Image (spheres, grey):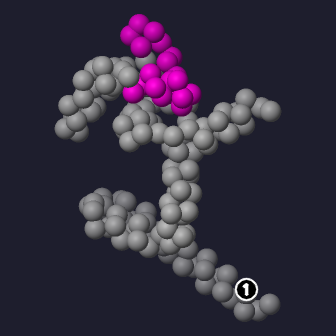
Amino acid sequence: MKKQDKNAKQNATIKLAPGELEILELLWGEKQVNLARAREWFHSRGRLLAMTTIHTRLNRLVEKGVVRRVAENPAIYEATIARADVSGRYFELFEELCGQNIVPLMAHLAKKRDFLPEELAFLEKIVRSRESGSAENRGASLSR
């Protein structure tokens, strides 16, 4: 088995706590960080986490194989798992829990957070694309 395939299979079974997902969010955005930068990132978001808490979370992620330490002094960390790999697993879980009906999730997101104009434009583009694809698929199925 290829190393990459083995890592993907291992990552598929890893459970990530909300705090660990926050660390991954930071790493996906900044590629590599040290403890001081991670603490600064959390503080800028109103999350006054202790350096030891951040260090513990990073070390747990290293142990789980989804983050690696690329330098020792100071320790610098980077993600070894892609955002799509993590979000795909959570989407599969959501589908299982909600019977594959995403409408409640979309309604909840729309009510709970403000979208940036570029986020709305992106979502509208996806909906338009799906609508035109659905119309093509309906037409194809009618002509059979």
Image location (x, y in percent) of residue 39: 27, 26
Q: Residue furthest front?
A: 97
Quick check: 78 above or below 14? above
Magenta span of residues: 57-75
Q: Is residue 29 visible?
A: no
Quadrant where the N terminus is found in the figure = top right
Label 1 crowd bin: few (<14), some (14–19), many (20+), radius 10 Å: few
Quarter of the figure with residue 105:
bottom left
Q: Residue at x 47, y 12 (%)?
A: 71
Image location (x, y in percent) of residue 35: 34, 20
Quick check: 21 above or below 142? above
Q: Residue at x 60, y 38 (%)?
A: 11
Residue type beneath disc 1: Ala
Please state the total of marks drawn on the protein image: 1
**On the image, numbered disc 1 is attached to which residue?**
140
Q: Residue furthest top?
A: 73
Image location (x, y in percent) of residue 4: 70, 33
Out of 121 and 97, give the one closest to the viewer: 97
Quadrant where the C terminus is found in the figure = bottom right
Q: Residue at x 67, y 81 (%)?
A: 137
Quick check: 60 above or below 118? above
Q: Is residue 24 visible?
A: yes
Quick check: 16 above or below 37? below
Q: Residue at x 45, y 9 (%)?
A: 72
Q: Is residue 144 left or right of residue 6?
A: right
Out of 88 and 34, give the one closest to the viewer: 88
Out of 83 and 49, give the one closest to the viewer: 49
- Secondary structure under tag 1 reads helix
Q: Is residue 30 magenta?
A: no
Quarter of the figure with residue 9:
top right
Image location (x, y in percent) of residue 34: 37, 19
